Amino acid sequence: ALCCLGSTAAVAGTRVPMLPPGNALNPQSPFATLYLPENLPSAADASVGPSAWTHAYGSPQHNAAFPLPASAPLWARAGVHWNFPEARAWPLSDDKPFGAGVYGIKEALPVQTQFYGNALGVSVVGGVVFAESDDMFAYAINAHTGKLIWRSSPVGNTLMGNPLVVGDKVYLSAGNVGFNFANVMRFKNNPASAGRGVNISYNGIYAMDRKTGALDWYFPTRGDAMPTPAYDAGRLFITTGNGSAVCIDATNGALIWRNHLGGIANMSSPAVADGRVYVAMSVKPFLYALDARTGKVLWRGTIPGAANTGMGDVSPAVSDGIVVQDAVANPMDIAGKPTLETLVRAFDASTGKVLWTYDMGRGHKVPAFKGGVPMIHDGVVYVGSPVTSAYVALNLKTGKPYWRWPVPNAGAAGAGRGAPTYYAGTLYVATGPNLYALNPKTGRELHSVHVGGRFGIVNPTIVGGTIYLGNSWDWVNAVPLREVNPAAHP
Amino acid sequence: ALCCLGSTAAVAGTRVPMLPPGNALNPQSPFATLYLPENLPSAADASVGPSAWTHAYGSPQHNAAFPLPASAPLWARAGVHWNFPEARAWPLSDDKPFGAGVYGIKEALPVQTQFYGNALGVSVVGGVVFAESDDMFAYAINAHTGKLIWRSSPVGNTLMGNPLVVGDKVYLSAGNVGFNFANVMRFKNNPASAGRGVNISYNGIYAMDRKTGALDWYFPTRGDAMPTPAYDAGRLFITTGNGSAVCIDATNGALIWRNHLGGIANMSSPAVADGRVYVAMSVKPFLYALDARTGKVLWRGTIPGAANTGMGDVSPAVSDGIVVQDAVANPMDIAGKPTLETLVRAFDASTGKVLWTYDMGRGHKVPAFKGGVPMIHDGVVYVGSPVTSAYVALNLKTGKPYWRWPVPNAGAAGAGRGAPTYYAGTLYVATGPNLYALNPKTGRELHSVHVGGRFGIVNPTIVGGTIYLGNSWDWVNAVPLREVNPAAHP
């Protein structure tokens, strides 16, 4: 009886069992959900932050900035400072990841992001910070005190997403970067048919009770579900490592539609706007606009020469009827070393017409995630690239560049993967072990602080006076804005 | 200071850091080592079982059978019955693994073995059962009571081995089956150069304190260390997913030699005998005899037509100057479906001369581990194959078959991966959810019991009156011999 299928309605034959592996039956299990209600936010604190989190990086624009009303608690406006150690916390003071001596620092950094700590940034809703970690746990942490409310490991797999939080549910996405041997051989014969995560570990979307962290239901996928899904109007939009786009009922996980596009969604999260879902895949490198209601392809576009993990790494950003996507492209060996370009392209959101293409430049190939997550604010695209280890600001309508900021001491694995955040006239960037404040008009660096560890594809999540972050070293960090930008927030 | 390199002497530049990720710094971490000294065996119980465990399946012959002296405690002679739930324990009563509805039962079975429970069988030394699980924990369990003595998760990775236990140490091997994208592309261009586990998760050998489960030191490897190492005369012999054979000092993890052979060791554990180490690789499919002192290749042999994960899956067995190895070979589509043969071959241990080759027959391709682990007892080779789902008994000197036993209801994923165990005139086999007793002279089934869950590449470990087992459903099972073979042990 413990193992039976759930009563959840399932459309089109999809079965939604209630008990996945790892929803440990044994309360003594280290994977059993831990719930500490004494750490729930107070009524006043529960008003801090947005009321829902529907997209990776907070919105289709990817600008995770949330001002507070004047009635907000003082701590929230002043900012708080804490570091929460997750299950495999590695010393923040250690500037080298595990295995640097064996794999080399260049490879060891992304490995620590992919298998040890937080790949993306955190979500903040109602006074609670929600984080997914590659340590296989999700966490709910009191945004004020930094104390644990719950931790839960619904399945034995890496959790690489930025938790979605809507109503009484938190949605987690499970999947890791591996290919099994059968898919390695499949890639040899027909690359676009090879699925990442197929028959290797447990993939899918896990819907947890927002308050307690208990598993409500889950929707298994065949390929990995590394990308964070997107939520709109009661539905979740999912992309997978075996090239599928899927729409499910966010209430009960029932399948609404599925469209097998081919290729691989690595970490590219969908964006939903105006009834269309934007989805990007690598290997068969296309940006697709799908009808949100039916999943049918309305248009598809590409980036010329998109290569390697290219388009499937990057989550498209959408604003003002324009979709912005970037990808590494046009590999070329220079002096015996592999190099890549990073191209940014804007598409008309309703027709797919190419509006402009901007070449961020060429640089040495980096391991793992190779693009930069674009962020759009007030008609400007802000985007980085670990290939060039620089951020640029571009005019959303024309692609004309305003400035270019090279990340200091970017290191061998490159820096510039995470989306910047615009808040109260300043641009914030989390990259390497540091947080930076930049002048958004000039790209001039205003100030920086050393947090420690490493920020992978992490964007600063700013709620009032605090920046919340996920760290590859397996910590959640809260840093007051005034420490990063003392001139603007004395 | 927490993060510093250890004081362990390191030969040839190998650094042996003391703190891997997952040796959680935080005692509140779910991955922190749990030690319950109240469950240590009594002085009398500590005499049960061998005094060391030096090879996968207990010895180079792979016959994990350990009779007891007459002075042994009554419970040990009579046998005990318990089931210990590990961290992700799935109900033993559930005959379907997770994901069967999504991946199909054929694929879901090995996925549960590879990512959820115990891939191999257990080790028993001094009244304690030692188990490694793909739930990322290792366990020490009181052989008499089935109570936990310690559990420890030294690293965030699957532990697929059969723990070695020598002196005051337990050696664990970490590595999973995944290939990262860079190695997927490398396989496309030059298959033998692609490394499994390279820059994907944390690989290596972890030396734990036998009594408490605390980490002593570890030796990181670049490719996965899925295969259980072998111990001989103070040294550990390791094979990896990127085709290396490595010898380290078992006391402190210092490198003694390394020989990069190429290809992939999947689950093939080395065997050491008479100063030679026998090592098998797939993709570049060879069985190597190496000088245990220097790592130099003394001879190498192959199995004609060895294909797919072939030779690298299977641990060679050695006895009486003969090495026995098998592999899937000669792929052929029949009626549109892929099929394989399983060939067993015997080599002269000192010269590599082929003594005989036996064709176990052709069958449909199965997922994951495709060979059978051979066991040698008293001049007879006992070996199965999931491709044919049958066990055979062969004359060690001539390869002449004595009998063939088809596994009943073997299922789509095939049965016959684990080595049989010969004990007191009976042959025991763990396959599917069942334990079987066979007449070793005729292959006739004497009796069977349903344990539940699934046995992957699991051999019955027999100590006196009890069979100890690791289960893909994430349990350790203890079953009295008299239940499996009531006629011989009434």
Image (cartoon, coloured by chain):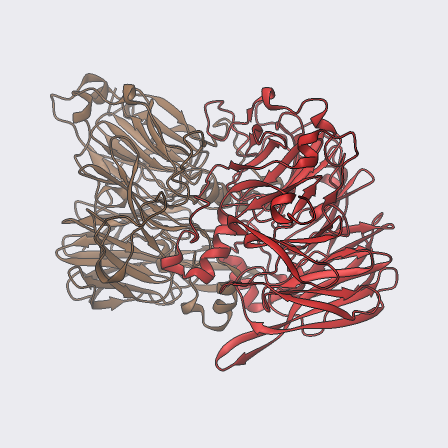
Chain colours: A red, B brown
Q: Is residue B56 left or right of residue B472?
A: left
Q: Residue at x 44, y 43 (%)?
A: A90
Q: Is residue B458 above or below residue A307?
A: above
Which residue is nearer to you in this view: B218 or B476? B218
| In this picture, residue A71 sits left or right of residue A193 | right
Q: Quadrant of residue A52?
A: top right
Which residue is at the front of the view, A67 or B130? A67
- Say left or right for A173 vs A157: right
Residue B424 in picture, x, y percent from top left? 19, 32
Question: For the C terminus of chain A, which image quadrant?
Answer: top right
Question: Can you say whether A320 is above or below A365 in the image?
Answer: above
Q: Quadrant of the N terminus of chain A?
A: top right
> Could you say which is closer to the camera, residue B159 or residue B329?
B159
- Residue A416 point in image, percent of width and height: 61, 60
The image position of residue B153, as x and y in percent, is: 39, 38
Does residue B304 sit above or below B415 in this rendering?
Answer: below
Furthest residue in direction top, as rendered: B74
Q: Between residues B265 and A410, which one lies in front from this camera angle?
A: A410
Residue B337 quadrant: bottom right
Question: Dividing the picture into quarters, in which one does residue B426 lie?
Answer: top left
Specify whether residue A404 is in view.
yes
Q: Is residue A301 visible?
A: no
Q: Residue at x 81, y 65 (%)?
A: A347
